[in-house]
Image (tube, grey):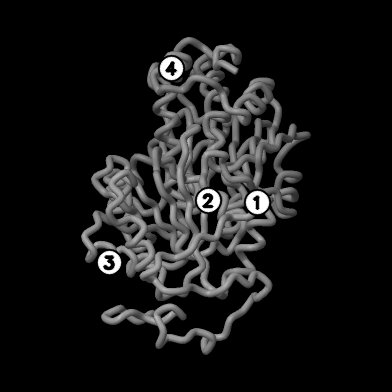
Amino acid sequence: MKFTAFNLNSQLLEAIDAMGFKEATPVQEGAIPKIQEGLDLIACAQTGTGKTAAFILPILDELTQQHEMETSTLIIVPTRELALQIDQQIQGFAYFTPLESLAVYGGGDGKDWVQEKNALSKGADIIVATPGKLISHLANGYARFDKLQHLILDEADRMLDMGFMEDIQKIITYLPKERQTLMFSATMPDDIRKLAKKILTDPFEINFGISKPAEGVLQGAYLTYDAQKIPLINSLITDKPYLKSILIFSSTKLKVTEIARTLKKNGHKVARISSDLSQDEREEVLRNFRSRKTRILVATDVLSRGIDIKDINLVINFDVPGDAEDYVHRVGRTARAETTGLALTLINEGDMYKFRQIEKLIEEEVMKMPLPEEMGEGPAWNPKSRFVPRHFKNRKNPGRGGHKKGGKKER
């Protein structure tokens, strides 16, 4: 379906064309007409389906027709990265309009606070905010939402996972009861259903491709001992110049630091990103990665959702995600916008059962590939085992989870 079919105003269509969008995605086809009708909406949609444009475009279209300098739309998101991404997309779509938006998130300086205070008190058309920072402003009494028409919760399941349920409910007490509410979530657990029942009115519900990686993602896995993981990554990316953009996810900040440090010693252009960095540092890291100044970005799970970085060639799960849904979001960082990409997962002997649950969820068996010969053997595939005691590993044999001469011992 062409975007002209939605009867959007000419300013938005001009921006859509300038940004290179040609046809609407399924989630946009399903959501935009319902939002234009003024209905409340629950949309189940995963990363990479175009859901941001699905709620932004109809809202912008309405605001351009009745523009007043007041905050008419509030978008609540779980992370500062997602807030910035959505704000950037709004600015792109609204380029030829007088509409203004502002991202409100933690980690800024005093100048950011003043800018946010002015927007919240005097009015910006669209506010994109993380719950904690927004509550800090609300507590000071100057934030004005009396003219609010639209409330959007994006990545609602992630916000609940991060413990924002009470914050969201508190924020809603400051908003008009008469409003349009849109909820976008990758999953619909019971807590999300309960929240939706409280804050939405007779919502229309749509579901798009939940828990399935994009068709363009070529998935693979390696069965490895922990000590083999970093050497394997180095082997996979060395002498492969066509892999220009590589994203590695790990479960802890400590591992992120170790992976980045080791790969850098091996001559790779690598950066890391985690909550240890300041907001300015994180934004600089992302800019360098987007512009290809940095080839490899090693990240904690904070980036598995909500970061729109195009043309990532390879995503590596250093650890199997703790939640099967997170696997879909992690591998969703590649093969965006109908491109193709490669997603590899490194599975140690303790994570096999967990990875088998992921395969059941996505209804697909991921190919287990042999390790390079010089790595030795990895553990045998045994998805029925949920726990492997420490003494199971034979650290004296590199092929049984040990270390080659000169290698660094895992802790």
Against 323, is 1 above or below?
A: above
- Residue neighbourhood size for the residue with mark 4, other residues' Cα within 10 Å, grouped as few (<14), some (14–19), many (≥20): few
Looking at the rendered structure, the secondary structure element under dot 3 is helix
Residue under label 4, please give it: 17
**Residue 47 visible somewhere in the drawing:** yes
Q: Is residue 233 left or right of residue 391?
A: left
Residue under label 2, please give it: 219
- The amino acid type of the residue labelled 2 equals Gln
- Which mark identifies residue 261? 3
Q: Is residue 57 left or right of residue 309?
A: right
Q: CA distance from mark 4 to mark 2?
A: 32 Å
Residue under the image location 47 percent in, 14 percent down: 13
Q: CA distance from mark 1 to mark 4?
A: 36 Å
Q: CA distance from mark 3 to mark 1?
A: 34 Å
Q: Picture coordinates of residue 20 (x, y %)? A: 42, 22
User: Are circles 1 and 2 on residues that touch, CB within 8 Å?
Assistant: yes
Residue under label 1, please give it: 364
State which quarter of the image contains the N terminus: top right
